[in-house]
Amino acid sequence: MKCGNPIAYPAATPPEQPVIFSDFDGTITQADVIDQILNQLASPAWRKIEAEWVAGRIGSRECLSRQLALVNTTTRELRDWIDSIELDPHFRDFYRAVRRRRIPFYVVSDGLDFVIRRVMRRMGARQPLRNGLDFFSSELSIRPEGLEIRFPHAAAQCKHGCATCKPQIMQKLRGESRLVVYIGDGLSDRFAAGVADVVLAKGRLLEYCRKQGIACTPFKTFRDVEEALLPSSANGRPAAHKASARRMAALTTA
């Protein structure tokens, strides 16, 4: 299957309860938050570091460490920037829908826990938002001498040098039989897309999936995501696109 094919649902027995993972920057938010922070609060040298990452010469962990070292800001200024971030206008409804249906949903991001918590509170999240349990991201501390970043979910065996090893987290949380759904927009999502059963993609991730022949469904907003994953006739359970040839044939045969 190539990108653009609709998600297919079996006629009789629905697939297992899924677990849904989503990128944050540029996916839940309309723009990359870290890029916005760097544009406004860092020296222009951050762009050269970004070019090294895009070219594959460094991993996202090294990229973020070097870039954030160039940022000069205060907690108040950073909070003001976060509160001005434009979000996907339909994410709130999608988030409420998965919570209502008790479908496991996790944000997995190279981005910053400080940002994710504040944005998710704006979206109405009332449950604890613990990095490593409720979402997975880099950790940010704001100190007088500058920003300090740590990478609690960077796997030692990750050959890509990722700030957050999304594939490892996804494999750990999928359980024995759950289908894994991944939603993303950028190059930092490409390794996650490689281990997901269902991929919804836009932006650079969509281009990557098309080039690599990774089955995916394009989306523009979380309204598209909700319509694809949570149709009322399917009990909110998406079918797998790529678990195995036999399994996929069973899932896509009406």
Image (tube, rainbow, N blue to C red):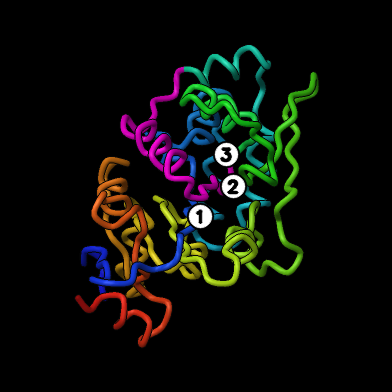
| Residue bounds of the magenta highlight | 84-111
Which quarter of the rendered picture does the C terminus lie within?
bottom left
Q: Nearer the viewer, residue 214 or 58?
A: 214
Which residue carries the number 1 mark? 188
User: Residue pushed farthest front?
Assistant: 12
Residue 216 in the image: state x and y as whole percent.
32, 64
In this view, 194 is above or below 126: below
- Calculate the distance from the C-alpha at mark 3 to the C-alpha at mark 2: 16 Å
Q: Are marks 3 and 2 in contact (CB under 8 Å)?
A: no
Q: Are marks 2 and 1 in contact (CB under 8 Å)?
A: yes
Say which element carries label 3. Answer: helix
Residue 54 in the image: state x and y as whole percent.
49, 56
Query: Residue at position x 49%, y 52% from top?
Result: 21
Q: Are marks 3 and 1 in contact (CB under 8 Å)?
A: no
User: Along the polypeptide, which appears first: circle 2 or circle 1?
Assistant: 2
Q: Closer to us: mark 3 or mark 1?
A: 1
Query: Residue at position x 68%, y 66% from top?
Result: 158
Say which element carries label 1. Answer: helix
- Calculate the distance from the C-alpha at mark 3 to the C-alpha at mark 1: 17 Å
- Amino acid type at circle 2 is Asp
Which quarter of the rendered picture does the N terminus lie within?
bottom left
Q: Residues within 10 Å of mark 2 (few under 14, many from 20)?
A: many
The label shown at residue 10 is none
- Amino acid type at circle 1 is Ser
Task: Judge left or right: residue 243 versus residue 150.
Answer: left
- Amino acid type at circle 3 is Trp
Task: Judge left or right: residue 22 versus residue 211.
Answer: right
Q: Is residue 230 visible?
A: yes
Q: Residues within 10 Å of mark 1 (few under 14, many from 20)?
A: many
The label shown at residue 110 is 2
Which residue carries the number 3 mark? 46
